[in-house]
Image (cartoon, rainbow, N blue to C red):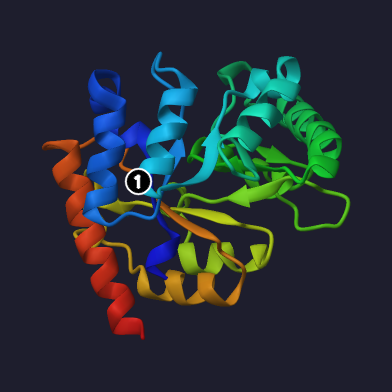
Amino acid sequence: MNHKLAVQLYTLREECKADFPGVLRELSKMGWAGVQFAGYNDYDPKELAAVLQETGLKTAGMHVGYQRFVDELDQLVADAKFFGTRDLICPSIPADLRNEEGYREVRRVLNEAAARVQQEGIRISYHNHAFEFETNVGGETALAYLLQPETDNLVLAELDVYWVKKGGNDPVSYIAPYANRMPIIHLKDMTNDEEAAFAEIGTGSIDFKPILTWGEANGIEWYVVEQDRCNRAPMDCVQTSFTNLTAMIRELK
């Protein structure tokens, strides 16, 4: 399972701005198998791709802004192919679309984009936060509406277990309907206190072992660790998450 462990580089955004190639090399030395992009921080994509080739790191999908699925879809496909990934993920949507009419538009737009790129072997997924649980669309939460596991819905899930719990749901139960419709899952822990803040994997209140077990039985290709905000050096947080996650994996064998 270790060959499926990746870091969402938003966690290390300041470090990437300062020395993106150095970050990639350090993550490789740490033992991560892949990285998930959230932009290039003004670095040349060719330089970053060369470092991936050098280190053996794979690309575990790319987070790209919602509007780019409307305006730059061909470029997104080209970028995905260049970095050797099948997965383009919408990481959020603008605030003015967070209403019933807006969510219907988002589902339509992402489905149209997914239909266009399907023949290129590219998949489109949606990454949640907690706000999608605050609006209902057709009698269900906006997130359930966006990710309905039906054949006519081409939008796949990239569920974030922290935000699922933040929205009042049990992560293991919530991910169950998305068997073989979630190639990538986001792993993020939650502090076990009133603040319920972001935490390193294995230091908080989320039980990851049943999530990992489910993932291995239901089509997860990448387990991507993300920590939106860190209370100490982000690279140290990433190291802690890797150490604890790989220990969990060993215990599951």
> Badge 1: few (under 14), some or many (20 or more) residues near its Cα, within 10 Å?
some
Under mark 1, the amino acid is Thr
**Viewer can see residue 232:** yes
User: Mark 1 highlights which residue?
Assistant: 55
Q: How many labels does the image show?
A: 1
Relative height, residue 216 to residue 196 (above, below): below
List the single residue furthest toward the left: 232
Residue 178: x and y in percent read 65, 62
Q: Which residue is drawn at 79% across and 28% down?
A: 109
Residue 238: x and y in percent read 23, 47
**Viewer can see residue 194:** no
Image-quadrant location for residue 71: top right
In the drawing, does residue 131 fall left or right of residue 121?
left
In the drawing, does residue 52 fall left or right of residue 185?
left
Relative height, residue 93 to residue 118 (above, below): above
Image-quadrant location for residue 116: top right
